[in-house]
Amino acid sequence: MRWLVFALLLALVGGSAALADELRPGFIELRQLDSARWSLGWKQPLAGAGPAQLVVPTIPRNCRIVEGPHRRLAALALVGSATLACGGALAGGRIGLSEIAGGGDVLVRVAPRGERVQSYRLTPAEPTVELASRPSSLQVWKSYGVLGIEHILTGWDHLLFVIALVLLVRRGWAIARAVTAFTIAHSLTLAGTTLGLIGLPGPPVEAAIALSIVFLALELVRTGGGTSVTLRYPWAIAFAFGLVHGFGFAGALQEIGLPEGEVPAALLAFNLGVETGQLMIVGTVLALLAIAGRMARPALAPALRIAGYGIGITASYWLVDRLIV
């Protein structure tokens, strides 16, 4: 029974050797230049190091490439660009990719002059989309909301912070206050950075995020059922570190960009998606703690300590890696 408790808690950190902040969706942007010309830009995430072939997106049938495609290498991605000549409206045409390699998502933005920007999210099951004549106002909410959920669920550094916080506090109302403080804090810096009001360089932010996880892991290992400043004031610690994590969320969002004219909606949708994913994680951890407490309470304390070591070792690796790069 004790090993079952270990397994339940270690399952929370078992995948943490993955990339720490994994929000690298591809994107395709089609922007109208004049009555007949459009600029096409796209980012193709790379699965790893080594050469890769640039995949040119599928474009509407009434469009043709007149310049390009051009290719350049960016961080973990290939970036392509081309100029299109299009005859007539694009409504009813399809845009996307023949297939989406690696199982990721692709965000599509189509920006006609003087009209509302259209936003779509492509998946491996639906790698192309038909352009609408009248875009729905829900497009941005759906696309960026899902991206927010994916970011918190696949961004292991933010995820491990929330997991460690719940494992450390473990008290219902205390967790609620701490998670609320974390949410308010990272929402403030996410909005401020995205709107250009504040900002910090990416490398120090990523290192500070890793350090915040190391801090909670040390608290988890050290307290052993005792008390500490973090346990007395978890909301304050969560708020302080939430400000730093907000800069990390903003950096991820800046990589994919925001649709012109829809920035507030996209920002709010992304943040609500992050909160939805965060609540899913909090609920899952609390459920596992409740199961472990009922089935083998004596094994819970050592299991939490082992989980703390696992989280701390992973975050320490990220910290060193981010400091030396």
Image (cartoon, rainbow, N blue to C red):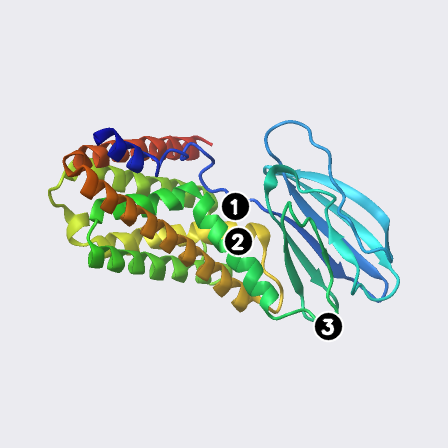
Camera sees residue 273: yes
Give the mark nearer the N terminus: 3 vs 2. 3
Q: Is residue 258 above or below residue 126?
A: below
Q: Amino acid at mark 3?
A: Gly
Tell me how many marks there are: 3
Q: Which residue is mark 1?
A: 23
Q: Secondary structure at mark 2?
A: helix
Q: Secondary structure at mark 1?
A: loop
Q: Amino acid at mark 2?
A: Leu
Give me the residue at 64% from left, 61% from top: 119
Q: Secondary structure at mark 3?
A: loop
Q: CA distance from mark 2 to mark 1?
A: 8 Å
Q: Position of residue 285 (x, y in %)?
A: 30, 46
Q: Position of residue 164 (x, y in %)?
A: 29, 43
Q: Position of residue 275 (x, y in %)?
A: 40, 58
Q: CA distance from mark 3 to mark 2?
A: 27 Å
Crowding near the residue tagged with mark 2, few <14, some 14–19, many ≥20 C-alpha atoms within 10 Å: many
Q: Which residue is mark 3?
A: 114
Q: Are marks 2 and 1 in contact (CB under 8 Å)?
A: yes
Question: Which residue, as the protein is rendered here, is positioned at the far top?
Answer: 50
Q: Which residue is mark 2?
A: 147
Q: Is residue 50 left or right of residue 203?
A: right
Q: CA distance from mark 3 to mark 1?
A: 31 Å
Q: Is residue 73 above or below residue 283?
A: above
Q: Amino acid at mark 1?
A: Leu
Give the mark nearer the N terminus: 2 vs 1. 1
Camera sees residue 204: no
